[in-house]
Amino acid sequence: MRSEPRSGCAINAAVEVLGDSWSLIVLRDIVFGNRRHFRELLTLNDESIASNMLSSRLKKLVDEGLLTRADAVRGQKAAYSLTEAGIQVVPVMVALGAWGMNHRPTSHELTVRARILAESPELVDDLMDELREAHLGVALPESPRPRASERLQAEYEAALGKM
């Protein structure tokens, strides 16, 4: 269950939920990798998270209200979905990605999406709406434009082609 933060400071309250070594990485893999099952999160993680750590972080993110867990029914795996609070972490991840690419050594290939998102707030908003549709069942309005994930992928591939 959610506990009261150590202080009334908003930054402290956020860091208590998101400030460990793995929570944002797990959320990143759900948001940008569309990984919704334990096994996908474990085996497709570039940082080699241990299974006990992943289990602990998923439980924490569910307890803190950033994810929900649909219990497995016979023949199916348990699936994790973002809540609205989890979706609202996306701009935080975009800001952290921008900071990381500007102040830390990173690889070009793994930084391209961070750069695209940092330069396109409208794309971030559209991606959040797409996540609301996929995770919360909120219908997207009809649009002649491609979906945010498709636009992000196309820009990513175009940027890699320019290497």
Image: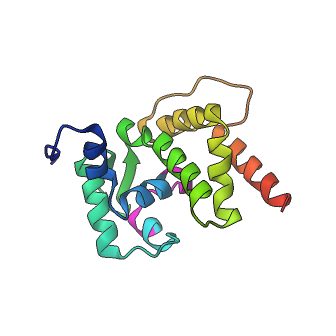
Does 89 lie within the magenta span? no
Horizontal and vertical percent position of residue 110: 64, 62
Asked if residue 146 shows in the view, the reply is yes
Front residue of 38/28: it is 28
Outermost residue on the right side: it is 162
Horizontal and vertical percent position of residue 158: 81, 52
Outermost residue on the front side: it is 103
Q: Is residue 66 above or below residue 25?
A: above
The quadrant in which the C terminus is found is bottom right
Q: How many marks?
A: 0
* Coloration of the structure image: rainbow
Front residue of 33/9: it is 9
User: Is 145 placed left or right of 70 in the picture?
Assistant: right
Point out the stretch of residues depicted in magenta: 31-39
User: Is 75 placed left or right of 159 in the picture?
Assistant: left
Rendered residue at 33%/55% (across/down)? 19
Asked if residue 65 shows in the view, the reply is no
Horizontal and vertical percent position of residue 32: 55, 52
